[in-house]
């Protein structure tokens, strides 16, 4: 198992990069406290290195794109985890339950060969890592923006919403460095380990939330819910508890979400009238790497054009919680118009919300 994280270009392609991506994922999972997922990824890497056959590994080995940007290791890891969750490959329990003294590579190889038809579709699209814990960063951003003088009433737009779990962020309660936000007790409660100064203690209101996804997930459909659970690293039991709470909330009132690509959605929403005294806020988390470059350019152009028209009474903000793979951390960068066009790192954070470093803490995952 890899011991150190190797910095590789997320957009890299070519010979050897597929194996390197799996090696990279092993280190990333290990650093994130996901040793069992790391074992799965290490076994897959070993199978690739030894030239194991089969349709699944052949497709992985000949991946045409950038395997790290495409989260290729996690696509296959999600498929294998689904076999465990559904009980269709009982032997994998030895890995997922953390047992020692087993041949991980042999167990994974057997699963790949036995379930080729079921596993191949998992390679067709990126993981759906819809994590409610990331909403703490979005709330922290709103506190920060309110402290900058923007109207503390927020119209929230999200791209890559997956199942819309973070679109329900106004139903959750947050303790952010002692600052309390949201209803009591809340459908979920978040108290991330806080590092640095507390965020500004400001009264904020979320007046609306709306999101998009190219393949939205319906949490009330048990089959779709199982697929989403398969992308949760099994070591992180609290995330399964959050998922169940989100399913309950979605059944009460579904989040407002449309099937649409990011660029089309942002352009359409920015064209709508904005109520005076509200801040229109675009937010996304661990999504940008999956947005095609042409759509990234369109989103950026649309935001900057709308920003140029923004006023103090109708401002615009852009909150992006994304991976900085050079520093091996997640950063939340906030831009706002007028006045904060250049952007600022407001937090550095654990990818699943376990801790938040205010003002750009240097802590890594």
Image (tube, helix red, strand yellow):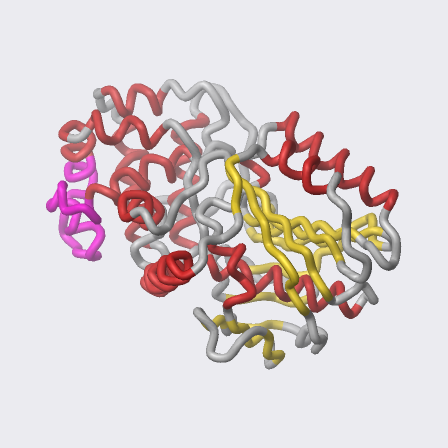
Q: Residue at x 44, y 70 (%)?
A: 187
Foreground residue, 173 or 209?
209
Q: Position of residue 310 (x, y in %)?
A: 85, 49
Q: Is 298 situated left or right of 325 in this image?
A: right
- Residue 324 lies in the magenta-colored region: no
User: Is the residue 45 above or below the residue 285 in the image?
Assistant: above
Foreground residue, 299 or 102?
299
Q: Residue at x 47, y 78 (%)?
A: 185
Residue 229 in sight:
yes
Residue at the limit of the structure toward the left, as seen here: 90
Q: Position of residue 164 (x, y in %)?
A: 48, 51
- Residue 86 lies in the magenta-colored region: yes
Q: Main secondary structure of the magenta part?
A: helix
Q: Position of residue 148 (x, y in %)?
A: 81, 66
Q: Residue at x 51, y 67 (%)?
A: 171
Residue 360 in sight:
no
Q: Is 296 situated left or right of 108 in this image?
A: right
Where are the magenta residues, as a range? 84-108
Q: Is 217 situated left or right of 42 in this image?
A: right
Foreground residue, 131 or 97?
131
Q: Residue at x 70, y 35 (%)?
A: 267
User: Is the residue 66 above or below the residue 5 in the image?
Assistant: above
User: Is the residue 215 above or below the residue 232 in the image?
Assistant: above
Q: Quadrant of residue 115?
A: top left
State the quadrant of the N terminus.
top left
Q: Quadrant of residue 106?
A: top left
Q: Position of residue 243 (x, y in %)?
A: 37, 58
Q: How many marks?
A: 0
């Amino acid at each position: 198992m890899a011991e150190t994280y190797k910095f590789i270009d997320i957009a890299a392609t070519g010979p050897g990069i597929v194996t390197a991506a799996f090696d990279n994922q092993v280190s990333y999972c290990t650093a994130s406290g996901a040793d069992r997922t790391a074992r799965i990824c290490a076994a897959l890497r070993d199978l690739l290195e030894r030239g194991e056959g089969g349709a699944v590994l052949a497709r992985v080995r000949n991946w045409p794109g950038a395997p790290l940007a495409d989260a290729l290791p996690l696509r296959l890891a999600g498929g294998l985890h689904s076999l465990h969750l559904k009980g269709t490959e009982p032997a994998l329990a030895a890995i997922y339950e953390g047992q020692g003294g087993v041949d991980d590579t042999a167990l994974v190889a057997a699963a790949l060969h036995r379930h080729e038809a079921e596993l191949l579709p998992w390679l067709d699209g990126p993981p759906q890592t819809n994590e409610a814990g990331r909403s703490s960063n979005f709330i922290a951003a709103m506190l920060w923006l309110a402290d900058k003088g923007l109207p503390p009433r927020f119209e929230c737009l999200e791209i890559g919403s997956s199942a819309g779990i973070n679109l329900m962020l106004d139903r959750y309660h947050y303790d952010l460095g002692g600052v309390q936000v949201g209803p009591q007790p809340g459908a979920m409660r978040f108290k991330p380990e806080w590092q640095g100064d507390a965020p500004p203690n400001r009264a904020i209101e979320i007046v609306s939330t709306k999101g998009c996804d190219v393949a939205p997930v319906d949490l009330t459909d048990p089959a779709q819910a199982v697929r989403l659970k398969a992308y949760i690293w099994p070591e992180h039991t609290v995330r399964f508890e959050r998922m169940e709470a989100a399913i309950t909330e979605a059944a009460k009132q579904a989040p407002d979400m449309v099937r649409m690509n990011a660029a089309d959605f942002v352009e359409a929403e920015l064209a709508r009238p904005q109520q005076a005294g509200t801040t229109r806020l675009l937010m996304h988390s661990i999504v940008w790497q999956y947005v095609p470059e042409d759509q990234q350019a369109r989103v950026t152009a649309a935001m900057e054009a709308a920003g140029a028209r923004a006023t103090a009474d109708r401002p615009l903000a852009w909150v992006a919680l994304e991976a900085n793979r050079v520093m091996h951390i997640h950063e939340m960068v906030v831009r706002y118009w007028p006045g904060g066009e250049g952007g600022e790192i407001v937090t550095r954070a654990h990818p699943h919300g376990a801790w938040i470093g205010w003002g750009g803490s240097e802590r890594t995952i």
